[in-house]
Image (cartoon, grey):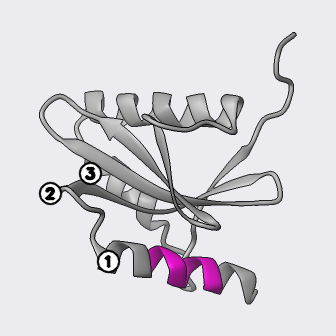
Amino acid sequence: MTNLFRLKVIFYKTETGNEPVREWLQSLRHEEKKAIGEDIKTIQFGWPLGMPLIRKLESDLWEIRSRLKNRTARILFSIIEDNMILLHGFVKKSQKTPKQDIQLARKRIQNIRSQ
């Protein structure tokens, strides 16, 4: 039986209308965008998933773990109802996900919930 459930992918939007994850993705090379897009699609149609593609960071915060050619990208996201909200994207430079990246994603979740 196939999974008919599908998450709706939404880019977090700032008060000024910017979409930080979309803008970050657009700055990447074509093959990197394609690889990350495939990972997002895998999650969109296969949720819930776990390691190695997804790692839960907190109760309502997960990271997409995309392997690129010679580096690693992360997108922090939250699930609200049937929406996968892409909160923050970055190229990982250290073993651990930096605290400031997690704090930024948390702040963006709070902004969404207060709207």
The residue at the point 84 percent across, 32 percent down is 5
Labels 3 and 1: the sequence-earlier one = 3
**Proximity of marks 3 and 1: CB atoms separated by less than 8 Å:** no
What secondary structure is the stretch in magenta mostly built from?
helix
- Specify the quadrant that holds the N terminus: top right
Judge by depth and name the residue closer to the eye, 25 or 40: 40
Residue 24 percent coordinates (x, y): 33, 57
Residue neighbourhood size for the residue with mark 1, other residues' Cα within 10 Å, grouped as few (<14), some (14–19), many (≥20): few
Extreme residue in the bottom direction: 114
- Specify the quadrant that holds the C terminus: bottom right
> Mark 1 — residue?
99
Judge by depth and name the residue closer to the eye, 16 or 80: 80
> Mark 2 — residue?
93
Magenta stretch in the rendered image = 104-110
Residue 8 percent coordinates (x, y): 73, 46
The residue at the point 29 percent across, 47 percent down is 73
Disc 3 to disc 1, C-alpha distance: 23 Å
Q: Is residue 75 above or below residue 6?
A: below
Disc 1 to disc 2, C-alpha distance: 13 Å
Q: Amino acid at mark 1?
A: Lys
Answer whether residue 45 is magenta in the image.
no
Q: Amino acid at mark 3?
A: Ser
Labels 1 and 2: the sequence-earlier one = 2
